[in-house]
Image (cartoon, rainbow, N blue to C red):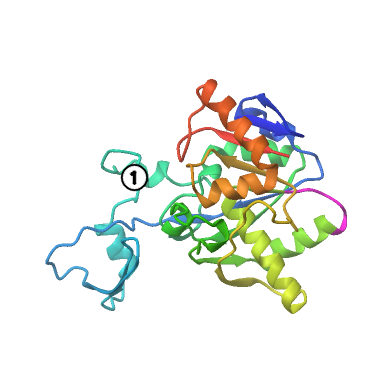
Amino acid sequence: MLHLQGGKFEDRQFGDFPELLHPSDLVIFNDTKVLPARLFGHRSPLLEAEVISRGEFGERTIRFAPLPDFFARLESLGHIPLPPYIDREDTLQDRERYQTVFARDPGSVAAPTAGLHFTEEILDRLRANGIETASLTLHVGLGTFSPIRTEVVEEHKIHTEWYQLPEETREKVVRAKRDCRRVVAVGTTAVRTLEYAAGKSQEIGQPPGAQFGEADIFIYPGYRFNVVDAMLTNFHLPKSTLLMLVSAFAGRETVLAAYAHAVRERYRFFSYGDCMFIE
């Protein structure tokens, strides 16, 4: 784990993470669960679907025939959608390995990878240190990983992703901000959810209860963060919206220097790679 603080960075182990936190911190996880959403088309009555529209960069919108047990059928026929740079077929082990230990709500086609570093032992240490935790849900779609193809960053259109911010989590965030305590987001998906929900609250005036809907926030340098004070994140692909988000949070030049250091020190990048704690 690369620890990035005040423009300076230090090589650490992820086991150090609980001790790097402040006792007053609120740590927020994304509890989405990856579906076996990769399907191969064959002529078969087991699961019927048709392509109803085509996107500009190879996307397809598919409509499935109604089934009373659709998700059970998906579990039976589907494959875990490993990232394209993992050049092998998925295995039964991936159904467990490509999930976080706190995954609960099925709906993602990719794991919120910063959460893959956590074990039950690390979570126990957080609790033992008195760290407050909470969960939200953002179902990760393929659009998160689509490269920016426009010359002007602002012209890139990010895909929407379904999210839910439970009332309990929302109340914890409100109390933490009121008490000047840090909100630490585990992963860019948690960052996007918190910042999007905060923007919606400002629009409609802090509604009671849970918040949910379709998040389409695109965070790039120049964005002013309203909720997140620190984040844990993996190392991301060039020209990705995820790298833009991290650059917005820590500063472009600082992030480029940190990535150059990570390359020199042979950090592993992407889904099963190493992570960076930014505060």
Classify 65 as above or below 108.
below
Task: Identify which amino acid the numbered label 1 is placed on.
Answer: Pro
Which type of secondary structure does the marked residue at label 1 adopt? loop
Q: Which of the 4 quarters of the picture holds residue 97?
A: top left
Q: Looking at the image, can residue 108 be seen?
A: no
Q: How many marks?
A: 1
Classify 86 as above or below 59.
above
Q: Is residue 182 magenta?
A: yes
Spot occupied by residue 19 in the image (x, y as percentages of width and height)? 73, 31
Who's the residue at 63% across and 30% down the image?
A: 257
Instruction: Please identify the residue farthest to the top as the structure is shown.
Output: 265
- Tell me the quarter of the image containing the C terminus: top right
Classify 203 as above or below 176.
below
Spot occupied by residue 132 in the image (x, y as percentages of width and height)? 74, 48
Instruction: Please identify the residue farthest to the right as the structure is shown.
Output: 179
**Front residue of this view, candidates 265 and 162:** 265
Q: Main secondary structure of the magenta part?
A: loop
- Tell me the quarter of the image containing the N terminus: top right
106 left or right of 65 in image: right
Q: Is residue 50 magenta?
A: no
**Front residue of this view, candidates 34 and 266:** 266
Instruction: Please identify the residue farthest to the left as the structure is shown.
Output: 43
Who's the residue at 34% across and 40% down the image?
A: 93
Q: Looking at the image, can residue 35 be seen?
A: yes
118 left or right of 145 in image: right
147 left or right of 217 in image: left
Instruction: Please identify the residue farthest to the front as the structure is shown.
Output: 151
Q: Which of the 4 quarters of the picture holds residue 199?
A: bottom right
Spot occupied by residue 131 in the image (x, y as percentages of width and height)? 75, 43
Spot occupied by residue 216 in the image (x, y as percentages of width and height)? 56, 66
Residue under pointer 1 = 84
Query: Magenta residues?
Result: 178-183
